[in-house]
Image (cartoon, grey):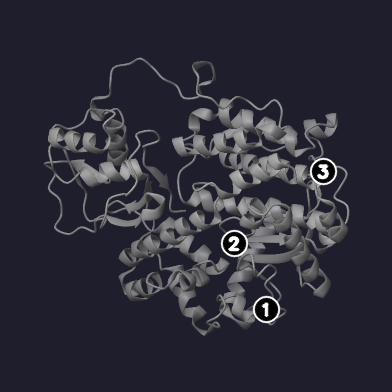
């Protein structure tokens, strides 16, 4: 693989905020632990069990909560924690039903009649192989119901029980993907918990593959007929695994402030897309540009073992009746990346948070050598996407002269090696991710007055106070601090340490990951 392709693979696959499977996994594990604390407070009768699970070693915790059925229950409980607090806990029920599962395997995985991990050296994914009737166990029943919900939405008619040939083809496609793209390809597979096989047709024709959302988290389905060519198998695995990776990224921070905003109909489809789909699809297609470039440049040794890569790329047919279908356009990942980049940075760039902009800019800068004509990613005035108005300052944004204190009781979990603090404000189920700068400012809000707070801030940020006001405003908006003089309750859970990294003012805002 040419040097520039190797470098793009490394940049996209190891970026500590948006690329590294290890750091994304660590943030999601922290989210599980803090989420269990929230649920323990909402469901006192289950607090002991939630506390036990929350104290499990990382491997044991993830074996339980990365199970698609239990993960779905976790997300559901968090979503209704405030809106319907009297509703029984689905997660508690599923944990009881998982009691008989084999300890070395996840709850649903342990109920499979035969156990198959398609890429054991790359991640803990398992294959849905069971031929048992779904009423044989409550977890199988729950798994089937969630599958049916997804299948109905995707136009899929039935689950397929894989034979040895299909399982071998699946593993072969994963091996090729990891060899071709050792950072982005192998890393994306880490985000898969469950692989199933299915057949059906949607409005675009036969369904070859699809990733599931929160109804069946970290799961993807493939058609056995699409896996006969290792290159096609690798392409589909990469495409769907990237969707699952993006779901994990979005759970651990807010990238878009108005994610439900409708953006119009992309040329290759016939339905309106919202911003969630725009940014998720941009993430996938930009990576697929790299995949097809790497396939075209694959060394002879890979071609000898896996056959010749496709002469032309195919990223999915344009929907019949769409503009692109009529004109024969937008049939490549490059064309779709260019279109979605303009949507993300220009048409709707005002909805990006600072983290969202950082992710999009990093992604587009990395693949720019492969996609001529991408929109510029600089922040110069002619390309600015954030509106700046010369108006009087908002009085609410002027720092309080008496200083601030941390609201109580606050739940926090520091990720020291990432310079990140995960926090939950009192009476909330909303998780807030503080970067090193916001965390540092949060640590200074101990009741000292504003003059003392500013002096302490300048000792670590001698460049000036420009980043302080924005961080205080974000912390206030998140409900984590209050002006001094507001009586705090008697108890508090506080971070044991402050961040070890120097607090940079740029990108200093707190970011929220909604409990979905």
Q: Secondary structure at mark 3?
A: loop
- The x and y percentages for residue 413 are 34, 57
Furthest residue in direction front, as rendered: 3
Residue 265 in view of the camera: no
- The quarter of the displayed image where residue 411 is located: bottom left
Foreground of the two, 94 or 460: 460
The reply to whether the C-beta atoms of the residues labelled 2 and 3 are less than 8 Å apart is: no
Q: Is residue 258 above or below residue 350?
A: below
Q: Is residue 192 left or right of residue 15?
A: right
Q: Earlier in the sequence, mark 1 or mark 2?
A: 1
Marks 2 and 3 sit apart, C-alpha to C-alpha, by 29 Å
Where residue 85 appears, as percent x and y from the top left, is: 35, 60
Identify the residue at image location x=14%, y=44%: 447
Q: Position of residue 206 (x, y in %)?
A: 82, 53
Helix or strand or loop: what does disc 1 sit on? loop
Q: State the CA–CA distance, disc 3 to disc 1.
A: 34 Å
Q: Which residue is mark 3?
A: 313
Q: Sort mark 3 into few (<14), some (14-19) or many (20+) by Cα contacts within 10 Å.
A: some
Disc nearer the start of the sequence (3/1):
1
Q: Nearer the observer, disc 2 or disc 3?
A: 3
Mark 1 neighbour class, 10 Å CA radius: few under 14, some 14 to 19, many 20 or more: some
> Mark 2 Cα within 10 Å, few/some/many (few <14, many 20+)?
many
Reading the image, the residue beneath label 1 is 115
Does the rendering let one see residue 144? yes
Q: How many marks?
A: 3
Which secondary structure, mark 2?
A: loop
Q: Nearer the viewer, residue 433 or 203?
A: 433
For label 2, the residue is 216
Q: Judge left or right: residue 42 versus residue 75.
A: left
């Amino acid at each position: 693989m040419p040097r520039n392709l190797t470098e793009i693979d490394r940049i996209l696959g190891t970026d500590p905020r948006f690329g590294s499977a290890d750091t994304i996994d660590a943030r999601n594990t922290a989210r599980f632990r803090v989420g269990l604390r929230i649920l323990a407070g909402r469901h006192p009768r289950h607090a002991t069990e939630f506390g036990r699970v929350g104290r499990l070693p990382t491997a044991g915790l993830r074996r339980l909560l990365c199970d698609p059925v239990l993960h779905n229950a976790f997300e559901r409980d968090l979503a209704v924690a405030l809106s319907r607090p009297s509703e029984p806990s689905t997660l508690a029920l599923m944990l009881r039903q998982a009691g008989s599962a084999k300890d070395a395997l996840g709850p649903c995985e342990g109920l499979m009649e035969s156990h198959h991990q398609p890429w054991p050296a790359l991640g803990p994914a398992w294959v849905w192989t069971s031929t048992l009737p779904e009423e044989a166990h409550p977890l199988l029943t729950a798994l089937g119901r969630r599958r049916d919900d997804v299948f109905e939405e995707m136009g899929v008619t039935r689950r397929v029980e894989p034979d040895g040939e299909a399982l071998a083809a699946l593993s072969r496609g994963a091996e090729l993907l990891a060899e071709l793209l050792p950072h982005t390809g192998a890393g994306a597979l880490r985000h898969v918990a469950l692989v199933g096989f299915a057949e059906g047709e949607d409005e675009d024709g036969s369904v070859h593959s699809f990733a599931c959302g929160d109804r069946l988290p970290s799961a993807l389905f493939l058609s056995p007929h699409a896996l006969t060519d290792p290159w096609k198998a690798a392409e589909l695995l990469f495409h769907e695994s990237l969707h699952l990776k993006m779901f994990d990224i979005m759970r651990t921070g807010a990238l878009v402030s108005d994610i439900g905003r409708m953006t119009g109909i992309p040329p290759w489809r016939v339905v309106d897309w919202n911003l969630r789909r725009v940014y998720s699809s941009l993430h996938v297609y930009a990576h697929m540009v790299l995949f097809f470039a790497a396939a075209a440049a694959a060394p002879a040794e890979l071609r000898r073992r896996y056959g010749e890569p496709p002469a032309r790329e195919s990223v999915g047919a344009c929907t019949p009746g769409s503009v692109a279908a009529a004109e024969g356009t937008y049939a490549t990942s490059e064309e779709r990346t260019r279109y979605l980049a303009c949507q993300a940075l220009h048409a709707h760039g005002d909805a990006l948070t600072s983290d969202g902009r950082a992710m999009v800019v990093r992604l587009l800068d990395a693949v720019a050598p492969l996609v001529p004509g991408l929109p510029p990613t600089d922040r110069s005035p002619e390309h600015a996407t954030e509106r700046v108005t010369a108006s009087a300052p908002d009085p609410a944004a002027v720092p309080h002269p008496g200083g601030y204190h941390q609201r109580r009781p606050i739940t926090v979990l520091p990720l020291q090696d990432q310079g990140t603090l995960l926090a939950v404000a009192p009476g909330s189920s909303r998780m807030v991710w503080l970067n090193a700068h916001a965390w540092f400012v949060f640590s200074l809000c101990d009741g000292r007055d504003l003059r003392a707070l500013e002096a302490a801030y300048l000792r670590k940020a001698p460049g000036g106070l420009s980043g302080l006001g924005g961080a205080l405003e974000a912390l206030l908006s998140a409900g984590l601090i209050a002006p001094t003089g507001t009586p705090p309750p008697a108890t508090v859970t506080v971070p044991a340490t402050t961040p070890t990294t120097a607090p940079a003012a740029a990108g200093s805002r707190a970011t929220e990951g909604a409990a979905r």
